[in-house]
Image: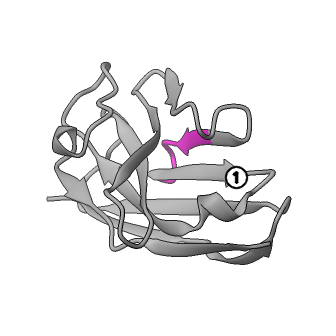
């Protein structure tokens, strides 16, 4: 069993930056794909970014060039650096762990463990 805990959310102005962290416990996640999703009020949960066991990375088109996903296997932690934030980035951000090691799933069903989420609000 894996427990995931996100942190780092908050309120930021348009153009600002935030760095989210996702600390895993219960077992090491270094061998698995980790992903970030987000869900805005009234909308479906949306894929944001994923990173596989070798550091291969994928981003959604909406965040490409602005967000950076990374992982620190020694700390069993995944990060999401968010720059040039826009009001449309406002959402609850969730960290997730897949049982896949290489292929990065881009749908909710591809992940089996989820954190509780952290709120990111970007003011205009």
In the foreground, 88 or 97: 88
Furthest residue in direction bottom, as rendered = 11
What element does badge 1 sit on? strand
On whether residue 56 falls in the magenta region, the answer is no
Range covered by the magenta-colored residues: 69-75
- The image shows residue 73, relative to residue 64, as above or below, that is below
Q: Which x, y percent locates residue 102?
A: 32, 19
In the foreground, 107 or 75: 107
Q: In this view, does 68 lie to the left or right of 95?
A: right
Total numbered labels:
1
Q: Measuring 35% from the left and 70% from the top, which residue is drawn there?
A: 42
Q: Which x, y percent locates residue 12?
A: 77, 74
Residue position for label 1: 82
Quarter location, residue 107 = top left
Furthest residue in direction front, as rendered = 42
Q: Which x, y percent locates residue 124?
A: 80, 72
Within 10 Å of disc 1 (Cα), the crowding (few <14, some 14-19, many 20+) is: some
Indicate the quadrant containing the N terminus: top left, top right, bottom left or bottom right: bottom left
- The image shows residue 50, relative to residue 28, as above or below, that is above
In the foreground, 39 or 19: 39
On whether residue 71 falls in the magenta region, the answer is yes
- The image shows residue 72, relative to residue 54, as above or below, that is below
Q: Which x, y percent locates residue 4?
A: 34, 64
Colouring chosen for the image of the structure: one colour
Q: Measuring 62% from the left and 59% from the top, which residue is drawn there?
A: 88
């Amino acid at each position: 069993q894996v427990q995931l805990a996100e942190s780092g959310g908050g309120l930021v102005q348009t153009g600002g930056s935030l760095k989210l962290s996702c600390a895993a416990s219960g077992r090491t996640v270094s061998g698995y794909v980790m992903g970030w999703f987000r869900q805005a009020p009234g909308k479906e949960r949306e894929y944001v970014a994923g990173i596989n066991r070798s550091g291969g990375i994928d981003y959604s088109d909406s965040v490409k060039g602005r967000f950076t996903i990374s992982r620190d296997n020694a700390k069993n932690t995944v990060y999401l650096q968010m720059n040039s934030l826009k009001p449309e980035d406002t959402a609850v951000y969730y960290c997730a762990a897949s049982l896949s090691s290489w292929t990065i799933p881009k749908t909710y069903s591809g992940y089996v463990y989820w954190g509780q989420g952290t709120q990111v609000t970007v003011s205009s």
